[in-house]
C-alpha cells in the first residue's frame, strides 16, 4: 500500500520582511526519495527546515500554513518539538561531526534521549554504522577522533548519528556538495538503500543527482512550487516551461 508521509498545505515562511516560501502545497510519499531542486535562493533549504521546525531557531522567522506528518500538524501549539526533531533527522551540507570519538558521535543522540546505555548502546552504534555503510571501515577504531575520518566518511558518520535515534524521516541538505565523486557515489547508493526503511528528502543543486537518486522531484523557483511529480515525468515531460528551461540549463 502506498502512503503519503508528509502533507504540506499552503506553507509560507518569512524571515522578517523577506517572503521566502509562498503557498507551497504538496504531499511526500513514505519510503521514497524526494529531491528538492531549484536555483540558489529559491527556498529549498527553508522548505526542508520547515519539516522539523528548524526555522523556528532563526530570529525573525514566522510561518503560516500547515505541515502534517502521519496526519498530525507539526505547527499545532501542543506539538513536542524535541520529539519532532528525533522523528525527523537532518544531515547538513558540510559534514559536521562532534569533536568526539566515532563511537561517541553515534551514541550522543540515544544518550541524550535516554533510550539506551551499556551493551544496548553498543548495539545501536553498530546498527547505525552498518546502516550508514561505515561499520566495516571503522569497527577497529571506534574510539578514534571523528575528525580523523575522510570527508565522505564524516558525512556517513553524520548519517549514522541521525539514524541512531530511529527517525522516520531523514532530511538531507545537499549532502554531497562538499565531497569528491567517489564519496558522492557512496552517499547516493546509501540514500537509495535508506529509502527502503525511511522517508528521505534531499535538497540538491545537482540535476543529474536528482535524476539518479530520487523517486519524486519538486522544483522550486522564487519561493513557489512550480512542479512536483515522479522524477522520470518531471525530467522527461515537464508540465511547466520554467521547469523545462531549468532542466535544460537555460537558467539556474
Image (cartoon, grey):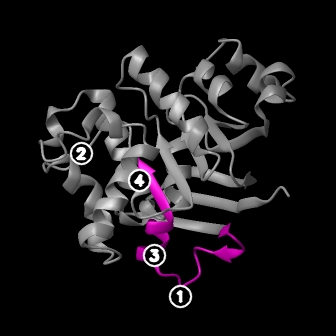
- Tell which tag, 3 or 1, sits nearer the viewer: 3
Per the model, the C-alpha gap separating discs 1 and 2 is: 32 Å
Please name the residue that numbered disc 2 is placed on: 97
Chain-order first, disc 4 or disc 2 = 2
Residue 18 visible, this orientation: no
Please name the residue that numbered disc 3 is placed on: 83
- Residue 221 falls in image quadrant: top right
Q: Nearer the viewer, residue 211 or 37?
A: 211
Asked if the stretch drawn in magenta spans residue 232, the answer is no
Picture coordinates of residue 79, whole percent (x, y): 53, 82
Picture coordinates of residue 65, whole percent (x, y): 66, 68
Bounds of the magenta segment: 67-91
The quarter of the rendered structure image containing the N terminus is bottom right
Q: Nearer the viewer, residue 111 or 120?
A: 120
Circle 2 Cα neighbour tier, 10 Å, few/some/many (<14 / 14–19 / ≥20): many
- Tell which tag, 3 or 4, sits nearer the viewer: 4
Circle 3 Cα neighbour tier, 10 Å, few/some/many (<14 / 14–19 / ≥20): few
Q: Nearer the viewer, residue 158 or 130?
A: 130
Please name the residue that numbered disc 4 is placed on: 127
- Residue 195 falls in image quadrant: top right
Q: Residue at x 65, y 75 (%)?
A: 73
Amino acid at each position: 500500500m502506498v502512503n503519503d508521509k508528509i502533507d504540506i498545505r499552503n506553507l509560507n515562511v518569512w524571515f522578517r520582511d523577506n517572503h521566502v516560501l509562498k503557498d507551497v502545497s504538496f504531499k511526500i510519499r513514505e519510503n521514497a526519495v524526494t529531491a528538492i531542486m531549484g536555483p540558489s535562493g529559491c527556498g529549498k533549504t527553508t522548505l526542508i527546515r520547515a519539516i522539523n521546525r528548524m526555522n523556528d531557531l532563526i530570529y525573525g522567522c514566522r510561518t503560516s500554513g500547515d505541515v502534517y506528518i502521519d496526519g498530525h500538524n507539526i505547527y499545532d501549539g501542543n506539538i513536542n518539538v524535541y520529539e519532532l526533531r528525533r522523528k525527523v533527522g537532518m544531515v547538513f551540507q558540510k559534514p559536521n561531526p562532534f569533536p568526539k570519538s566515532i563511537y561517541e558521535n553515534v551514541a550522543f543522540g540515544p544518550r541524550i534521549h535516554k533510550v539506551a546505555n551499556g551493551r544496548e548502546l553498543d548495539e545501536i552504534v553498530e546498527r547505525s554504522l552498518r546502516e550508514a555503510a561505515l561499520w566495516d571501515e571503522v569497527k577497529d577504531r571506534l574510539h578514534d577522533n571523528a575528525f580523523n575520518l575522510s570527508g565522505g566518511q564524516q558525512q556517513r558518520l553524520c548519517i549514522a548519528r541521525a539514524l541512531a535515534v530511529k527517525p522516520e524521516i531523514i532530511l538531507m541538505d545537499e549532502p554531497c556538495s562538499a565531497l569528491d565523486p567517489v564519496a558522492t557515489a557512496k552517499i547516493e547508493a546509501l540514500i537509495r538503500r535508506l529509502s527502503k526503511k525511511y522517508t528521505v528528502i534531499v535538497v540538491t543543486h545537482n540535476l543529474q543527482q536528482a535524476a539518479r537518486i530520487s523517486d519524486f522531484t519538486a522544483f522550486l523557483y522564487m519561493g513557489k512550487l512550480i512542479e512536483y511529480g515522479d522524477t522520470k515525468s518531471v525530467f522527461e515531460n515537464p508540465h511547466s516551461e520554467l521547469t523545462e528551461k531549468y532542466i535544460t540549463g537555460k537558467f539556474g
